[in-house]
Each structure stands twice: as C-alpha cells, then as structure tokens.
Amino acid sequence: MRSCVLARGSRLGSIGLTARPPALQQGVIATKAAVLAAPYDMNIKDMDTPSLGGDKDVLVKVRATGICGSEIHAYRGKHPRRRPPVVLGHEVAGEVVATGRRVRHVKVGDRVVIEPQVSCGVCAECLAGNHNLCSEKKLLGSSEWSGGFGEYVVVPEETCYEIAPDLPMHHAALAEPLAVGVHAARRLNTPPDHRIVVMGAGPIGLLTVVALRSVGARHIAVVDAKKFNTEVGLRVGASFGVHVTSAPIEEAVKSQTGWSTVDIAVVAAGNPSCVAGALSLTRAHGQVLLLALFEEPVSVDLMHIQSRELYVSGSKMYTSEDFRTAVEMLNAGQVPCDEIVSYAVSLQDVPAVMRYLNKSPEGVIKVSVVN
Ligand SMILES: [Zn+2]
Ligand SMILES: [Zn+2]
C-alpha cells in the first residue's frame, strides 16, 4: 500500500445503492465538492446544491466518478478546456433525484451514467454527426459545467443512459473512457489478422484493447514503462504486454513480440517517444492513430510518414453512438472492469489522491471516487 488514502478493494465489495438521499431543497442544502482553485491547489469546499437550470435538466446524485488522465492534465493547469476554478470529474454514474418539468425519458430513482458532452447541434460538424468535434460543445467537469468531484451534477436528460440493475456504479462510470476506445476502434480498419500495437497501458490504452477485441482484433501488443500495467494488458485481452525499460520503444516491441513491423499503431500515451515508436514500427500503408493528449508540441521524423505512405489520423472523445455501444458492453458484462478500477476512495480524499496520482505511481490503473 503506497498511500493511506488508497485502500485496494476496501469498498469495492460494499458500494452500490445505500439509503436514498434526503429530499432536496435546491440551493439550500450545502453539498461538498473538490474544487480546483488553481493548478495543484484542490480543496473540499461547501457548495450550494446545483439547481435544475432548465425544464429538460436532471439532478443526479453522484455515486461514482472515475479519475481520468485528463483530470491530471487539468490539475497541472495543462488541459486546454478544463481550467480552474473548476469542479472536475466527467466519468460519472449516479442516481436521478429530481427532474425538470419536461423531462420524459428519465425518472427519479433511475440509475444512469452520463455522457459528459453537449454539442451545439447547429454547426457543420454537429450537422454531419460529428458532435465530438463541435467547437462550441460544453464539457462536464469544466468551469462552465460543474463535474462529478461533487455530490451532485445537473445534466440534460439526453446525456443520461440507463445502466443494468446489477452493474456497480464504479463499473458504469467506465462507459466514458471505454467510449474513447470504442471510437478509436471505429476510426480504424481492423481485419482480425492485423498486428496492432497500443502505446500506453493506462485506462485509455487498456480500454482501447477491450474495444479492439470487441470488433474482432486478435493480435494486440500493449506497451508501457510500468510492468504492472503491461500485466493488466494481458488480462484484458492483449497477446503481448511489452514492458519498456529503455529507449527506443520499437526495439522492445520487436524483441518481445517477434514482430518486425505492425499494421496499426495506436498512441494512447502523450509521450513523444510513443509517437516516434509508432511511426517507426508501422509498415508501409499502415495506420497510426493519435488518441492521447499532448501537453506540449511533439517533434517527429515526418520521413516515416512520407516514405512508407502511412495513414496518420486522430481520434477525439466519441459520438453518442460510441457512448451507447460502451454502455451496452458494460450492461452485457463484456468488460473486465475490476482490472481497470484499482482503487475506490471517498470524495473527501480526492485532493490527496490527485496529489498522489500526479506522481504517476506504480500499481494504479484507475481510481474511482465512490459515494
Ligand atoms: Zn475520461
Ligand atoms: Zn456544434
């Protein structure tokens, strides 16, 4: 055990629905939230319970919120959209406790997971069905939309997806990062015989492995500098867990898989050497997909792309269709959730946990905040 606030599995067996929250008088009852006031400065504060802004809004009692790598970027002041002061948290599952007058598809008591984006609906990207690319969209867990590091969130009803009665809340909250993997898999052409390398075995890399397996990929190597993560990679469906101890990454991949090239490389860690390794390993006419967030501009050798006619593209969040697919996979029990959620903590512990996760500790895939 590396930190007193993290107790492996200590609450994982006992969460789920406990007593219903008391009837809410909106704006009156003080509720707690972990507020990021400035980079590296997060504290628990009393807030007013958020009120329903519109007739189609839903008030959700947060039961589980996954802590995402993008929250760590935000904690460092490095996320372009999630800037302090902010209540972070966008991987949210909970229970509906109040609904606006015109809400039709959700009712009090429903167990839901939230799609944490609302697009404008009228721009060219929205009209083309790419609402993940809408430049006007609002993100849950940003200064314009208070997130799941608080006891309650207010969300439009169309962002709520019902979850199976037996799906634990901290598993349901994985719908968000899994949807990222589902979208990535959809952005690629993945015949079953293709050899795929996934650079980075954090939650996004691992859930991308799960999503790739679900669309038929059979030969996946997942790569990480942390041995624990590569071992989890094997347990969630990768054929190889490549543990990299020294640069260059491509040599470790070749020696530990026996592959001289790959057909597809997915960059799921924002480390420049992962991009270099991906470009260098991918065969002529192969595909490279950039999925990670990069805190700084990355310098790469473009000759890899030119000389082997590589197809390099990006993948950003997900569409509602991807999110629904992720929820369906979770509801059907097709996701090895307990491999991904390493620890459960309480809201009170979030500031300490963020300090801890900022050091990129070994032995942790994802931490879930459970209430
Ligand atoms: Zn996330
Ligand atoms: Zn739009």
Image (cartoon, grey):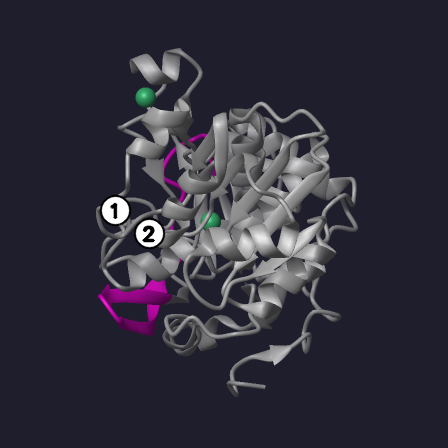
Would you identify the image quadrant in which residue 316 lies?
top left
User: In the rendered structure, does residue 280 fall within the stretch colored magenta?
Assistant: no
Tag 2 secondary structure: helix
Q: Earlier in the sequence, mark 2 or mark 1?
A: 2
Left/right placement of residue 64 relative to residue 17 reads: left
> Which residue has dot 2 on it?
272
Residues 244 and 260: in front is: 260
Residue 80 percent location from the top left of the image = 24, 46
Q: Amino acid at mark 1?
A: Val
For residue 153, which numbered disc appears in the image?
A: none
Magenta highlight range: 34-58
Residue carrying label 1: 298
Q: Nearer the viewer, residue 269 or 3?
A: 269
Callout 2 amino acid: Pro
Report which quarter residue 44 is drawn in: bottom left
Given residues 202 and 249, the one toward you in this image is 249
Q: Is 327 placed left or right of 127 in the picture?
A: right
Q: CA distance from mark 2 to mark 1?
A: 6 Å
Residue 357, position in %: x, y?
Answer: 43, 71
| Residue 246 position by quadrant | bottom left
Query: Main SS type for the magenta part?
Result: strand
Please state the horizontal and vertical placement of residue 206, each as a whole percent of the image.
60, 51
Which residue shows up at 34% across the image and 17% down it? 125
